[in-house]
Amino acid sequence: MSALLEKLPAPAVLEGGSSARSWRFEMSQWGSAMYGAALGLALFLVTHRAMSDDAMITLTYARNLAEHGVWGAMPGVTANTQSSPLNMWLLAAGGLLANGHVVYALGIVLSLTLAVTGRWAEGLRRCLGLHWAAPYLALTLVVCSPLLASTVGLETYLGVAALTGVARYAAADRAAAVGVVAGVALLTRLDMIVPVAVLIFALLPWWRSFSAAAVGAMVAVPWHVWSWFALGGAVPDTTWLKSSSGAALTMATSVGSYYFARWPVATFLTALPVIMGLACGVWALTRGGRHARVVLAALIAGWAHWAVMWLGGAYPQFWYFAPLVACSILATALSLHCSNRLGLATFVAALVLATGSLVASLPAPWSMAYLTGNYASTPQYAAVAADLGRLTGGQPVGSPGEVGALAFHAPVPIVDYLTDPAVTRPLLDERYRDAGPLKQTLLRWNWAHRETLTSTPLPRYQLAFSGVGVTSGREVARWQVLDSAEQPRTLMLLDTALTR
């Protein structure tokens, strides 16, 4: 096997003269990009019917932006609960090109994102002198990861691309390019500042690190200034609602007690690249050199993000683990050398892992994504949403705690803290009262330009799951659904008019 790996053809080297050799050289450079695009299309076809409820919130936002020019999940209602402006812009632009079909736009964005990831991974591979298969291995693991695949519709794969780009240009000591991609990463998700900062300061000379950070700030800050004035907060409201949550589950305890307990196979297959990345990190510590430095920087970046989210008290949403998984996969792929026993072991183990993930993902296309924790699948919510207009006479409906698929498919407004600022504001005020002096100061500064809202009555009709914070009221209808762990649940539509 080792001899076979070493005999695989290396990329063509352009030495001048032959147009055929030049064409082969260019194709070798773009091969990983085309492979990434093909994987993106395949991933979209497998997952597009099974996106998580949070992904459906994103698509609802994007459709509203494309059709009405409103930053929010309800027509005519501006909200500041979307974490990824870059994802919104791309999906909305794709929706305009796809005649309003933002789901098709998602397929386009996903394919292009993985194509860019492949191109940057190839550039990093060439910069470090790795085996030609390294970017293909990284792309395969990224697409086959049960956790990452379950985030389709969210901004996760944009973050993977941005981290790869930062590492690629930092390894080549191109500070300006690093800064641009770093700014793009911050527009993908603000918490990406942690792994991006680690990669920048670990791989660039310190005096060039600050110039890269300055360029990144010039790319990202204008959006946050605009958001501060136009949306009432420099950062999304969900930043405050999903941090310091006080929940019993944390980024540390949830792995075993929640995710592995409910999805043992998917969690195990997700964790394996993280373990492989740690093994590659141990190897890098003993080796030294530029290549080993990039491997260690990638690992530290992923674990630093996880640690910050843990210490910040973030509720352990499954996509919060994505930077750790992606950086571990990058470190694993970067250990693939032509003549290296660890590289051979990495290659074989990664192929086995990818094959196992593909087998575990069957049948396809998915009916529900792994690890989501949703109370019902998107098709089930769509069926419920289709009945709401008739059952309520077109009146707004309160969400049962999950709003994305309902808001996307329902002909009536779905009221939730993620869609209606009047519902969001009391939760933010509660976080303010519970905060310490420093955080209260930050919150006052962040909300300096937010509008004063008048309280609005709660919707007459309320969706609720049986046994989960049920609101009293007359039952109008009920539906039997299966949650993401395939456990039966009862969703009820209640008329609360007579109980107020």
Image (tube, helix red, strand yellow):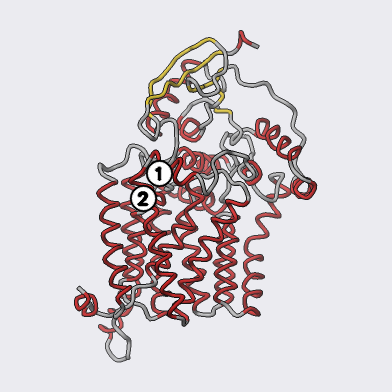
Quadrant of the image for the C terminus?
top right
Closer-to-camera residue (231/246)? 246
87 over 24 or under it: above or below: above
Closer-to-camera residue (233/273)? 273
Query: Residue 213, image x and y in percent?
Result: 64, 70
- In the picture, residue 419 is in which quadrant? top right
Residue 101 appearing in the image: no
The residue indicated by pointer 2 is 268
The residue indicated by pointer 1 is 260
Query: Residue 100, image x and y in percent?
Result: 45, 42
Q: Residue at x 41, y 29 (%)?
A: 382
Residue 141 appearing in the image: yes
Q: Residue at x 47, y 81 (%)?
A: 290
Label 2 – label 1 distance at C-alpha: 7 Å
Q: Earlier in the sequence, mark 2 or mark 1?
A: 1
Closer-to-camera residue (361/264)? 264
Q: Is residue 363 left or right of residue 124?
A: left
Quadrant of the image for the N terminus?
bottom left
470 over 241 or under it: above or below: above
Closer-to-camera residue (492/40)? 492
Q: What residue type is disc 1 on?
A: Phe
Q: What residue type is disc 2 on?
A: Phe
